[in-house]
Amino acid sequence: MLAANWSNESFSTAISRTFDGEHPCPLCKAITAGKKSEQKKEFTFAALKLEFPPMTEKVALIPPKPFPSFSSTDTFARSFFQKPPVPPPRIFFV
């Protein structure tokens, strides 16, 4: 709508005419007509009883296999408890 108004009039006049609400475009008219024709529908909730067909076979639930247990000793954690050698090695400082 702005582009159509701008091609015929100045920019400031086209902006004011586009957004003043007194000169709606065909799309705006169609939207307004659609909103007027809408009717609010009343929602009715009908509680239905769920019926399941009888099962011919019995169902057995099998629990999953247990996870493997890990040992309580952790060799990696034990390596942190070793004291460093005294005096520190000087090979790296050469």
Image (cartoon, rainbow, N blue to C red):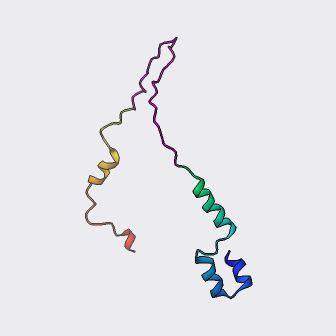
In the displayed structure, does residue 16 sit left or right of residue 52?
right
Count of residue discs: 0
Magenta span: chief secondary structure: loop
| Above or below, comparing residue 60 to residue 66 in the picture | above
In the displayed structure, does residue 55 sit left or right of residue 74?
right
Q: Is residue 17 magenta?
A: no
Quarter of the figure with the N terminus: bottom right
In depth, the one of 28 and 7 nearer the eye is 28
Q: Residue at x 55, y 49 (%)?
A: 39
Magenta-drawn segment: 40-67
| Above or below, comparing residue 5 to residue 77 in the picture | below
Task: Pinpoint residue 29: horizontal percent, then vertical percent.
Answer: 65, 65
In depth, the one of 89 and 5 nearer the eye is 5
Q: Residue at x 35, y 36 (%)?
A: 70
In depth, the one of 68 and 18 nearer the eye is 18
Q: Residue at x 36, y 33 (%)?
A: 69
| Above or below, comparing residue 50 to residue 14 in the picture | above
